[in-house]
Amino acid sequence: MPALDLGPHPDTHLDADLAAERAHLATSRAALGRMRERAESLFATGDQVAGDAYAAETLGRTLARRVAELADDPTTPLFFGRLDFGDTTGGSTTDSAPADDGAEASGDHDGRRYHVGRRHVTDERGEPLVLDWRAPVSRSFYRASARDPQGVAVRRRFGFSNGVLTSFEDERLDRGEELGTTSRILTAEIERPRVGPMRDIVATIQPEQDELVRADLADSICVQGAPGTGKTAVGLHRAAYLLYLHRERLRRAGVLIVGPNRAFLSYIAAVLPALGEVEVEQATVEELISRVEVRAVEPPTVAALKHDVRMADVLRRAVQAQIGTPTEPITVSDGSFRWRIGLEPLHRIVDETRGEGLPYSTGRERVRARVVSLLQRQAEARRAESPSDAWLRRMSRCRPVIEFLDAVWPALTPEGLVHGLLSDPARLATVADGLFSDTEQALLCWAKPARTPKATRWTAADALLIDEAAGLLERSSGFGHVVVDEAQDLSPMQCRAIARRSEHGSVTLLGDLAQGTAPWAARDWRESLVHLGKPDAVVVPLTVGFRVPAAVVAFANLLLPALAVDVPPAESLRHDGGLDVRTVTDLTAATVAEVRAALAHDGSVGVIAADDAVDGLRAALADAGVATATADDVAAAERVTVVPATLVKGLEYDHVVVVEPAAIVAAEPRGLHRLYVVLTRAVSRLAVLHQEPLPAPLSNGSVPTGPATAEG
Ligand SMILES: Nc1ncnc2c1ncn2[C@@H]1O[C@H](COP(=O)(O)OP(=O)(O)OP(=O)(O)O)[C@@H](O)[C@H]1O
């Protein structure tokens, strides 16, 4: 049997193996320590080495990053796997190998042995002790199978506890042995109690996940995955992989992770640094588009109109409508001569520039430059010499030229454009005609507009319009790769905001149509991809669930027919766990009792309720002496978190207590989708407490009641 259970072990051969692996770990840790010391001492002396201040700063940053990358967390293993390549030439397997990342063909690794870990570790001679999981050769650790061993004779996985190597598990791929998802080490990792922030899954990435992680940088992909299938994990590991492979390019252009809210972003924030990646920007869409301060809310119907993709056309037309027709020639005097540009060339300049489709503000400068160039030509013809730069500058800023520009191509700001449009029904009507009905236009226009953009109390949706307008006025620089999580909730206009930031890069879109809770949530990934400017991206399903136990998945899936989405069903890898659905007479008292009982187990406890019930539950728990944390405080010492239903997307807790599903459903138009999200947060046990009847799709199914049905 390939799986080895190691603890105190009678088999001296296995004990010797384990001892050798522990020694290799100790050597590797010492080597990493030396690498870090070297980086630290370079960092300390960096300013004396570098030539100028700029070089010193750049070098300083690089070295500081290097030091951070080489941080060693004593509680996580430096390596988690080993690959022994078979020897087709007849020699014996040798430890380590040439520091080879490039050799793709397995033949180059004949007879070699590699430890696979979080980052490269080399000994003093530069020989690899641990290979980075992202190196080409490490791919076989994730992908080799009995059917396609890729030259690997033995794949070894290590079990660790607090950074100490405790066991290993071998698969003799050369003998057709393969554990797949029955691996004990994988099972232990999936079933481990959760505490604190999200962790990396680098040791146990599954083959279908690895394919997504290692997709080409040029490939935009969309992952449709049921709850807990590892979408977030895949997106983060893909970011780390791409940074490794395209370090310089992506460091310049940047990698961006977009998540639904701050609680989620703080939950995932530690994953990339743990993988040695300390320079990835993480933001919500709202943070990305924060040109103006949001100081007001508006009715959902109005917000929905502003999130509608028709607004993009309205704004485009509004910008176009600013471009006028020249009505008078330009006459300029430079003190010595008078110059004149007639209407005909001015028409030509404006038409040509309009035809070039440049961002509006660039267009204005182009018109200016062309006007000045005509003046220059006249001056050259008359004086037989080129005018000076100062003369050209003066001409470009002289009053007749500015007046001409202001008449035919006026300067615009994004805020000014949107303010002008929403405060003037007649102006809106000219550009919204045929796109929005009269009623819709009336909804869009402000009843009492502020006098200036500055005085306007903008809403979140206005900020989105301003961002769209900014994209029409100026060219923005984008990221090299953008990972968008919970993407099903993006509106078309939000997709466009992200498209502007990934125009020359690629995107990884992660989401689940069944979890769409925004009023504008996607119903078809193809549409989102069009708005994101990546219409050709492939949509790949993930269907193996790593979080939610099978019994809980089955319960949550009772909701699926009512959600009106076409998504492939998921299969749970977890057959442990418990589900307890209970009618109670006193919700608060039952919640407190449930939390107390949950605290007898290891791991985190999440109490999830309709937003307006949260404060009451927190107070009741506090009165009962149970300290609670908030969802955005991932470092909290408290094991119990009370989370409003609207903030729980993407998060998970070992033991989840859902309080009054009917209230969660009633709180918002897509309340059933919200409930589906809420019910799929449990890693080990789910308790559903209700006083009101369960929402119809749940009460119609055969719901297990009473105490836990399949307690693991
Ligand atoms: N290959 C794996 N090995 C071990 N654990 C995994 C693996 N893939 C995912 N997990 C774990 O499963 C849990 C769910 O993963 P993740 O949050 O990435 O799923 P998701 O699809 O984004 O979920 P949701 O739809 O709820 O947002 C996490 O605890 C993650 O660490």
Image: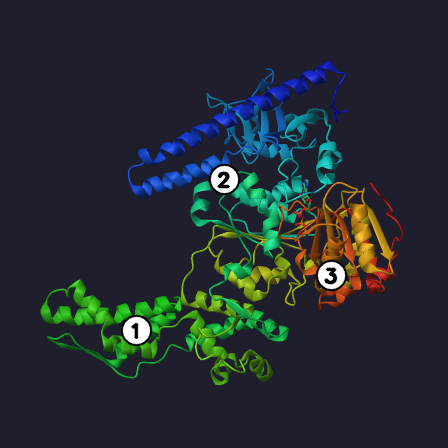
Q: Dot 2 lies on which element?
A: helix
Q: Where is mark 2, residue-wise?
A: 245
Q: Dot 1 lies on which element?
A: helix
**Disc 1 beta carbon < 8 A from ligand 1?**
no
**Residue 572 relative to residue 309: left or right:** right
Which residue corresponds to the image point at 44% horizontal and 66% vertical from the top-left?
Answer: 470
Which mark is in front, 1 or 2?
Answer: 2
**Disc 3 beta carbon < 8 A from ligand 1?**
no
- For the residues labelled 2 and 3, say whether their Cβ atoms are less than 8 Å apart: no
Residue 674 picture location, percent across and down: 72, 61
Q: Dot 3 lies on which element?
A: helix
Residue 601 picture location, percent across and down: 78, 41
Give me the C-alpha separation between circle 3 and circle 1: 67 Å
Which mark is in front, 3 or 1?
Answer: 3
Q: Which mark is residue 688?
A: none
Crowd class of label 1 (few under 14; some 14 to 19; many from 20; radius 10 Å): some
**Residue 631 relative to residue 704: left or right:** left
- For the residues labelled 1 and 2, say whether their Cβ atoms are less than 8 Å apart: no
Question: In this picture, is 214 found above or below 642?
Answer: above
Q: Where is mark 3, residue-wise?
A: 616
Residue 590 picture location, percent across and down: 83, 55
* First-in-chain label (2 vs 3): 2
Amino acid at the residue labelled 2: Leu
Which residue corresponds to the image point at 79% horizontal and 42% vertical from the top-left?
Answer: 600
* First-in-chain label (1 vs 2): 2
Amino acid at the residue labelled 3: Gly
Q: Where is mark 1, residue-wise?
A: 349
